[in-house]
Image: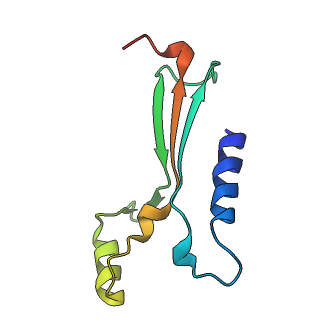
Amino acid sequence: MYRVLYGTSKHIALSIRAGDSYSKIAKVISVSIVYFNLGIGEDYLYHGKTHFIGKTTKEEIHKDSKIVEKMKLLKNTNFNKIAIYPEYYLIQIDKYQDV
């Protein structure tokens, strides 16, 4: 898991140069096909994303949330700041039952 995080972080850091606008940061989708048991979970396919959840309200900020819609109106932009965070797919081959 550390290596997956390192790989996505490194790719993000390499996608932008000093002085560039942060809007140039590349969206990263990481697909890890592992040929060993991770030692966690029973499924063969996992998907993960970054989530932001309010500590007191439990409100989740996601691409379709009211908060993001308000941000778009205030900044008059179509850019979805939540969609830029990396997504991770983990495929555990030893648990994949030829489905």
- 3 relative to 75 in the view: left or right: right
Q: Viewer-proximal residue, 10 or 40?
A: 10
Q: In the picture shown, does residue 90 fall above or below 67?
A: above
Q: Quadrant of residue 4?
A: top right
Q: In the picture shown, does residue 98 fall above or below 39?
A: above
- 59 relative to 69 in the view: left or right: right
Task: Give the image location of residue 30, x and y in percent.
Answer: 55, 44
Q: Quadrant of residue 73?
A: bottom left
Residue 55 visible? The answer is no
Task: Give the image location of residue 77, x and y in percent.
Answer: 33, 82
In which quadrant will I find the C terminus? top left
Please name the residue shown 68% across and 64% down the image.
Answer: 13
Residue 34 visible? The answer is yes
Q: In the picture shown, does residue 32 fall above or below 64?
A: above
Q: Quadrant of residue 98?
A: top left
In this figure, what is the number of numbered marks? Answer: 0
Q: In the picture shown, does residue 4 fall above or below 70?
A: above
Please name the residue shown 38% across and 75% down the image.
Answer: 79
Q: Viewer-proximal residue, 54 or 26?
A: 26
